[in-house]
């Protein structure tokens, strides 16, 4: 159960940030969905990232025990004609309840932050809450005349839409067995 590389990374990955002037902004996004299935079913599907995220190109276990604290993966995601890579490490996990991960783009500078998935049993099934807290870097020459606020709003909107769409696929998988 890991999250995607986010919409704005296509824009920021094309330039190295070491020498360039850059601006940073934070993304704080919550996506919630109720799934008519038990927490056990949802947890099981959530761990099968490549089934419910259509942008996944590759998923490689690189350290630790899969699905356990300390487990790390390298995810390649399609962004148009390119593949963008992110690493994610599980910081805390309680099966069928929550999972906290640290994520960063492979270059270590375009984006870094945390994603938390929480599951809550309800009479109607399971409430799935995804909280994303991310620091993003945009090289100055990638602003293309837009303000940082405009870029931040576009990234927030695009990332929220992607999370919501992915969660709808997860819902269909869980509810339709």
Image (tube, rainbow, N blue to C red):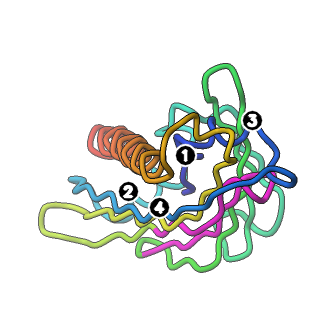
Q: Which residue is most to the left?
A: 123
**Which residue occupies the foreground of this view, 171 or 140?**
140
**Which residue occupies the foreground of this view, 146 or 73?**
146
- Secondary structure at badge 4 equals strand
Q: Residues within 10 Å of mark 2 (few under 14, many from 20)?
A: some
Disc 3/disc 4 C-alpha distance (Å): 20 Å
**Which residue occupies the foreground of this view, 139 or 84?**
139
- Residue 135 in the image: state x and y as whole percent: 59, 64
Query: Which label's residue is closer to the chain start, 2 or 4?
Result: 4
Q: Is residue 78 left or right of residue 154?
A: right
Query: Which label's residue is closer to the chain start, 4 or 1?
Result: 1
Whether residue 104 appears in magenta in the rendering, the answer is yes
As displayed, is residue 11 above or below residue 111?
Answer: above
- Secondary structure at badge 3 equals loop
Disc 3/disc 2 C-alpha distance (Å): 39 Å
Magenta segment's dominant SS is strand
**What residue is rendered at 51% in x and 79% in y?**
94
Mark in front: 4 vs 1:
4
Task: Kindly identify which numbered label has been placed on residue 27.
Answer: 4
**What residue is rendered at 87% in x and 52% in y?**
19
Q: Residues within 10 Å of mark 3 (few under 14, many from 20)?
A: few
- Residue occupied by mark 2: 41
Disc 1/disc 2 C-alpha distance (Å): 26 Å
- Residue occupied by mark 3: 14
Q: Is residue 93 left or right of residue 132?
A: right
- Residues marked 4 and 1 touching at CB (< 8 Å): yes
- Residue occupied by mark 1: 6
Mark in front: 3 vs 1:
3
Query: Which label's residue is closer to the chain start, 1 or 2?
Result: 1
């Amino acid at each position: 159960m890991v999250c995607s590389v986010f919409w704005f990374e296509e824009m920021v990955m094309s330039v190295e940030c070491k020498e360039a002037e850059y601006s940073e902004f934070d993304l704080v996004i919550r996506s919630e969905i109720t799934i008519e299935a038990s927490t056990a079913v949802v947890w099981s599907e959530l761990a099968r990232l490549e089934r419910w995220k259509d942008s996944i190109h590759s998923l490689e276990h690189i350290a630790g025990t899969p699905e356990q604290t300390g487990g790390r993966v390298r995810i390649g995601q399609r962004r148009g004609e390119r593949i963008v890579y992110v690493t994610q490490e599980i910081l805390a996990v309680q099966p069928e309840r929550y999972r906290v991960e640290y994520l960063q783009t492979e270059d270590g500078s375009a984006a870094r932050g945390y994603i938390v998935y929480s599951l809550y049993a309800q009479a109607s099934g399971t409430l799935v809450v995804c909280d994303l807290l991310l620091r993003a870097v945009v090289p100055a020459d990638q602003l293309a005349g837009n303000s940082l606020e405009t870029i931040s709003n576009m990234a927030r909107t695009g990332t929220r839409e992607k999370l919501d769409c992915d969660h709808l696929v997860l819902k269909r998988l869980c509810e339709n067995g």
